[in-house]
Structures are given as C-alpha cells and as structure tokens.
Image (spheres, rainbow, N blue to C red):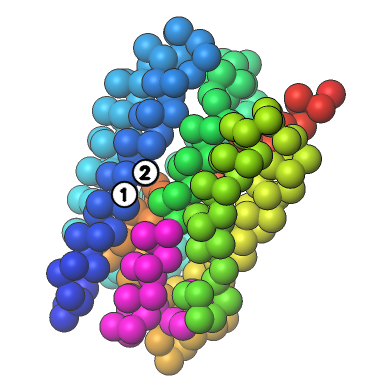
Amino acid sequence: MLENLPLFVSIVFILATILTLLLVFWTVKNSTSLKVRGYASGILVALVIWLIIQGVLTLNNVYSAFPNFFPPTILLFGILPALITVLILFVSKTGQRFMDSLMLTNLTCIHLVRIPVELVLYWLFLNKFIPELMTFEGRNFDIIAGLTAPIVIYFGLIKSGVKTKVVLLWNVICLGLLLNIVVNAFLSAPSPVQKFAFDQPNIAILHFPFSWLPTFIVPVVLLSHLISIRKLINSRG
C-alpha cells in the first residue's frame, strides 16, 4: 500500500476495477452466441481469481521489492500472462468465434472506464507516486478515449446503423493513445530500462491496488480495441 495516499484515491480505483469487471461480464452476457453467453459467469469467476492473485502478489511486495530485476516481476507474473491470453484468443478458432460474437456497442462501453482511471492517475501524480508525463497534463491523452466513447456509441453505432470507417478510425486512434501511455508508464517505472521520470518515478503500479491497472484494466481495454478493429475490418471484407 502507498503511504500517505488519500483513501479516496484507492477507493475510486477499486471501483473503476469493479466497473471494468462488470463491463466485461455484461459484454459477454450480451454476446450473439448462446454458448458464449453461458461462459459469462465462468469468465467473471476467473477474472476475480486473477485479481485476487495479483492482489496477493502485490501485497507481498513481489512487484516492488526487486526494482533492479529484469525483466520486471510485474511483467513476468502480471502483464505477460494477460498478453498471452489475448494472443491465444486471436490464434485459436474458439477464441475467434468468441470474439466474433461480442457486440461492438458493448466493447466500446468498456472504454468509459478510462475516465476514472485518468482521474486516479492525476491524483497519484499530485501525491508524487507517478510522474506528470503519465497524466493529461503531460503526455497522456487517454482520457479522450473515455470522453468520446459515448459519442461514438450513439453516432457511430446506434444512430443510423454502424459507421464502419468512423468507428474503425476511432479505435485505431484510441489504441494509439493507449500504447502511448503504456510505453511511457513502462519506461517511467523503476527498472534497469527506466528512461524517464527519475525524480518522480512510476511506483504506484507496483503497489496495491494500482497493480490492477497494468495487469487487468489495460489488457481489457487493449483487447476491446483489438476485437473491435478485427470485427470492423472483417465487416468491410
């Protein structure tokens, strides 16, 4: 836990994590496939177990105790397994059928979570647990994705049908925004490859509950973009 951090910051972030969890459940539950809808509860349980595992690892200082270890322990035990899961979904026929059954509207709603996350990052910066470059006052413009998601949902997906080019462009741009902050956050965290923010490094993600950001929320947001882009490209074919 981060010392002297106002309690409300952690509470808001935990609520944002729960929101992400519920949005994933809702997305699967609204699948066009009856079989996939049946997986919703199991996926929810699996994700809760994953969050518990990440919480235990973080509270036992597995991520924060070895800043000079390479590759970083959070990458090995938190981020890499999530990315492997994403890869499996894309290369397997079962995963492809699963992704194809998810609705674009639900997938786009997931990006609403980026609004509270960006507010939390700003508060963490004010309390000197992450650098300014990770906020909307620095190099992080990810909040734009969250703020524009309702507009895209209504005008790009609901009103007058799906506007494929517009929604595809939005997903590509917002994926770029996500990758931008991911790279800056990784290079600002204490590790042998740190390049930025030596005076105020990104230590928050190595502590509970903020380790859930790179190990859960970011992979979910990334996956929602990739699935949407895949669906939109396929729909044009």
| Residue 198 in view, yes or no | yes
x, y percent for residue 63: 32, 62
Q: Residues within 10 Å of mark 2 (few under 14, many from 20)?
A: many
Residue sitting farthest toward the front: 160
Q: Which residue is mark 2?
A: 20
Task: Name the residue rendered at 54%, 24% in the picture.
Answer: 102
Residue 17's tag is: 1
Q: Quadrant of the C terminus?
A: top right
Q: Quadrant of residue 105?
A: top right
Amino acid type shown at disc 1: Thr
Secondary structure state at the residue bearing disc 2: helix
Task: Name the amino acid, label 2.
Answer: Thr
Q: Is residue 140 above or below residue 210?
A: below
Whole-percent x, y for residue 211 in the image = 33, 58
Q: Residue furthest right?
A: 237
On the rendered structure, is 102 left or right of 233?
left
The answer to whether the residue labelled 2 contacts the one labelled 1, judged by CB atoms less than 8 Å apart, is yes
User: Is 144 situated above or below 170?
Assistant: below
